[in-house]
Amino acid sequence: MNLSETKSLAKPFSHIYVEDDALNYPLSKEILGRLKGSHIIKIKHYKDIFNRAGQDFLLQKQSRALILSVNRNEKIYPGARVCQSFGNDNFYYTSNIMNCIFDCEYCYLQGMYPSGNIVIFVNYDDYFSEIEKILAKHDMYICISYDTDLLAMENLTGFVDKWIRFTLSHPSLKIEIRTKSAFDTSCFPKCDRVIFAWTLSPEYIIERFEHFTPSLDSRINAVKKAIDGDYMVRLCFDPMIYVKDYKEIYKEFYEYVFSQIDGNKITDASLGLFRISSSYIKSMKKKRLTEISAYPYTCLEGVCQYEPKKSGEMLDFAGYEITKYISREKLFID
């Protein structure tokens, strides 16, 4: 799925807010050229729109505004403790975009951000400059699609192509691009230090909780194209969501995925259960009370998760099923 294929949305980005400082950046001009007909409103700072009080998050998710901004703050962050580093040292994350074109009910972004609108930071060269300073000290593994789905926005921003070309010219850099999109990666240059990481979920979970996202078959087709194109591919079986009859649903799901995708051809896979910051879940409940936000989680050290017994049962079950198709060494479990 790319931006033009997002299902069930009103025309995206009928209104575009542009910071005065962002207006003359080449990427701003490219984006505005691709969204001709949108109403353009000049602003001083993205927070004047993104952080204002009284926003209707759910309404904004149905018809988003776009905000073009210059990121004047820190751009590269050390990897969070709840995130999987896949055995890599010097793990970092970043994002050129705040918020996501998709609307997954379990997503932490709705707990972190006050708005459903999307911010694009157009000064990507400044990100690259910061990375070069870090690379002068040591090698680096960085997740670049962290607070968004970068690949789902590629037709509008071209960020993924820019990142891959930057990585090609920096041998000690390795990047991961996490996505639920069905974007065809064959347009990108080859680089053996770029990992495309697809989040795969049972169709039952997609239809129930992952609004506006591509179907499982669409994602699988994108994975197969990437593998056929000799790209490195990671399958992400997370977050695993507890639902009634989860064993039947997920067992059938794993069987289907590996009937379509050769487990020997993927780089690795991840498995993890849904978990979230306790402060984010409180905010999520205020915006949208759902089966996921209303669940009676166990909260330990500021992280809400399924109770230990259930967590253990779910991980044991899923790990057993997945390792029928790939080696245990290829599976990273959170």
Image: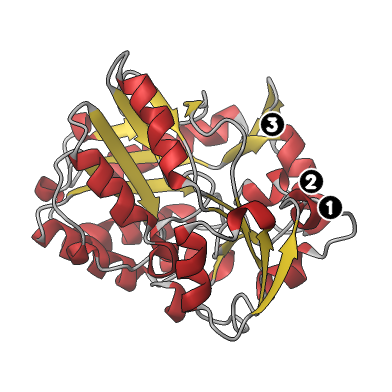
Circle 1 sits in a helix, a strand or a loop, which is it? helix
Q: Is residue 7 above or below residue 64?
A: below
- x 57%, y 30%: residue: 74
Identify the residue under disc 1.
286
Circle 3 sits in a helix, a strand or a loop, which is it? strand
Q: Residue 158 occupies which quadrant of the picture? A: bottom left
**Residue 210 image position (x, y, % from top left):** 54, 64
**Which dot marks residue 283?**
2
Q: Amino acid at mark 2?
A: Ser
Q: Is residue 76 above or below residue 67?
A: above
**Which dot marks residue 298?**
3
Compared across the picture, whether 212 is left or right of 10 comes to: left
Label 3 to label 2: alpha-carbon separation: 17 Å
User: Where, quadrant-wise, is the N terminus in this rendering?
Assistant: bottom left
Circle 2 sits in a helix, a strand or a loop, which is it? helix
**Which dot marks residue 318?**
none
User: Where, quadrant-wise, is the C terminus in this rendering?
Assistant: top left
Label 3 to label 1: alpha-carbon separation: 19 Å
Q: Amino acid at mark 1?
A: Lys
Residue nearest the viewer, comparing 294 with 136: 136
Q: Amino acid at mark 3?
A: Thr
**Residue 84 appears anywhere in the view:** no
- Pointer 2 with pointer 1, Cβ within 8 A: yes
